[in-house]
Image: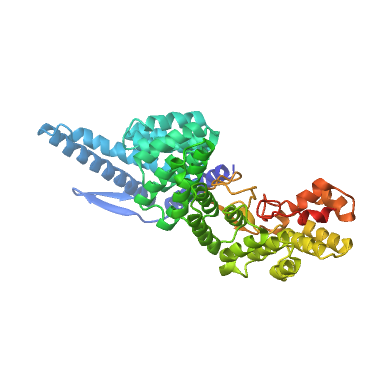
């Protein structure tokens, strides 16, 4: 609206300026005196300006006629395309001008104007490989998905534009949520241009989402081959995909030979905790405990984790609590100051009913890094040493509202899944989970209200079990690692 008013105002001002200029020239004295073939011609200032304008137009027409004459002479002399080239140059000039204006309109978000300019450029240039893309993108801007899809399909007919057409259709299917068709289109686009980073990333994500681990590993290897993925990142993600593939085979009751991917995943990335734990269990099943111990020690040095301790405990399930403590010393000796080591050794000593040793192993962790697990362990120690119930209940009350400590957290969206998974169930990112402490606001226990009867002294066996059975989260209480009822005595 404002632009229309501005154009009208500019037009009126221009006409007024021309009128004032003409009036000024008519009232002015002097002019131009021309002598042609002995005759004199006197031109007033106004006539002089008009004559100059006519002369410029005549000169332009003369140049055009001269160009046409040259083209005609070339045609007469045998150049059959001379005249067509003459007219084509003019048409191409106007066509490329329309194409440029269409691209500017597209960049400005003016979908309708871009489509109009693209149609004009197509009519003048007859080069759909240049104009169809503008038309398709302009149709998407205006919300005409059917028109965009139609144009993208036309792009498939030309070898030079086939990739653009496939990619455009792929993005449309992704926006529609049709991941099955989008996956097939992504595979086609990747085959056409394997170096295209965006396409390979989309294909890898779709393959991971559909649990096509073997296909995802091939895509990952192709990205490494074409230099679009750093080698260290490739090794880590290949390990994640190998582990996921092995877990899928395990779910299908595969043979021992097919489960070797656990060991392969651990070899590719020794610090990948799930791979280390499952590779160790694979060796335990084969009767090779030494290999299992070697894998778990290496992973523990990189990142102490309850799952590693649980797998380490499975190496010998019939040992006494004292023997288990002695065996675990070899696992944790290099990480004695790590919180996970302190809580693990405290739990093992509680299982052996050596509460002073458990307190010594826990140290001041309940004060320096108070979590639900460390405070619960302290409550068990207090109970085992005969502390009053009020003291035990006080520590339990603090444990209810304390942070839960490190968990699997998605680095991309900060989602907290119940267990490790190769692809985040919330944002779909691959290999985005890390074992870390989430923001405190996201770690509050949902069982706070349910645990209140236990805190104030009302018996509630189910809730007490929830307090101490944290084998699904971070500690090993309630598992085969702690073959003792000491912790559960707190609920009595």
Residue shown at the point (52%, 59%) measured from the top left: 299
Answer whether residue 449 is visible to the viewer in this image: yes
Please name whichever residue, 57 or 199, is drawn nearer the observer in this view of the structure: 199
Q: Residue at x 76, y 62 (%)?
A: 375
Query: Looking at the picture, does residue 35 appear above or below residue 118?
Result: below
Q: Is residue 447 visible?
A: no
Q: Position of residue 363 (x, y in %)?
A: 71, 71
**Colouring convention used in this rendered image of the protein:** rainbow
Q: Position of residue 353 (x, y in %)?
A: 74, 62
Q: Quadrant of the N terminus?
A: top right
Query: Residue 89 falls in which quadrant of the image?
Result: top left
Q: In the displayed image of the protein, which residue is found farthest to the left?
A: 77
Query: Is 194 displayed left or right of 311 in the figure?
Result: left
Percent across and percent down for residue 9 are 55, 46
66 sits left or right of 257 in the view:
left
Q: Residue at x 54, y 33 (%)?
A: 176
């Amino acid at each position: 609206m404002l632009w229309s008013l501005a154009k009208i105002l500019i037009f009126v001002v221009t006409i007024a300026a021309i009128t004032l200029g003409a009036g000024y020239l008519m009232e002015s004295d002097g002019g131009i005196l021309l002598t042609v073939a002995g005759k004199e011609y006197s031109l007033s200032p106004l006539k002089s300006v008009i004559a100059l304008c006519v002369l410029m137009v005549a000169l332009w027409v003369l140049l055009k006629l001269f160009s046409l004459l040259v083209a005609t002479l070339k045609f007469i002399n045998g150049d059959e395309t001379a005249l067509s080239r003459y007219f084509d140059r003019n048409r191409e000039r106007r066509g490329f001008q329309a194409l440029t204006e269409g691209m500017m309109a597209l960049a400005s978000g003016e979908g309708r104007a871009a489509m109009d300019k693209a149609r004009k450029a197509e009519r003048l240039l007859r080069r759909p490989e240049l104009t169809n893309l503008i038309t398709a993108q302009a149709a998407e801007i205006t919300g005409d998905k059917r028109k965009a899809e139609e144009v993208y399909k036309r792009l498939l007919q030309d070898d030079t534009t086939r990739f653009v057409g496939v990619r455009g259709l792929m993005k449309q299917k992704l926006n529609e949520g049709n991941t099955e068709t989008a996956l097939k289109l992504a595979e086609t686009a990747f085959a056409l241009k394997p170096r295209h980073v965006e396409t390979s990333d989309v294909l890898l994500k779709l393959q991971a989402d559909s649990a096509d681990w073997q296909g995802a590993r091939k895509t990952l290897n192709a990205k490494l081959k074409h230099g679009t993925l750093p080698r260290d990142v490739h090794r880590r993600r290949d390990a994640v995909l190998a582990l996921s593939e092995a877990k899928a085979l395990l779910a299908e009751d595969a043979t021992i030979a097919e489960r070797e991917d656990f060991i392969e995943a651990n070899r590719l990335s020794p610090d990948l905790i799930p791979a280390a734990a499952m590779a160790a269990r694979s060796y335990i099943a084969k009767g090779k405990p030494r290999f299992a111990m070697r894998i778990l020690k290496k992973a523990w040095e990189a990142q102490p984790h309850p799952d590693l301790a649980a797998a380490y405990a499975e190496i010998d399930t019939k040992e006494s609590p004292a023997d288990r403590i002695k065996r675990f010393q070899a696992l944790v000796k290099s990480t004695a100051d790590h919180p996970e080591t302190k809580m693990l050794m405290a739990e093992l000593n509680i299982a052996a009913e050596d509460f002073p040793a458990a307190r010594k192993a826990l140290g001041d962790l309940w004060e320096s890094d108070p979590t639900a697990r460390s405070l619960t362990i302290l409550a068990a120690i207090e109970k085992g040493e005969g502390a009053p119930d009020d003291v035990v209940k006080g520590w339990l009350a603090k444990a209810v509202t304390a942070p839960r400590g490190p968990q699997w957290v998605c680095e991309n969206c900060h989602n907290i899944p119940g267990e490790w998974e190769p692809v985040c169930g919330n944002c779909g990112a691959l290999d985005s989970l890390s074992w870390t402490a989430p923001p405190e606001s996201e770690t509050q226990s949902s069982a706070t209200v349910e645990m209140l009867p236990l805190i104030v002294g009302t018996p509630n066996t189910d809730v007490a079990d929830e307090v101490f059975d944290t084998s699904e989260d971070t500690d090993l209480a309630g598992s085969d690692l702690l073959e003792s009822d000491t912790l559960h005595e707190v609920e009595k």
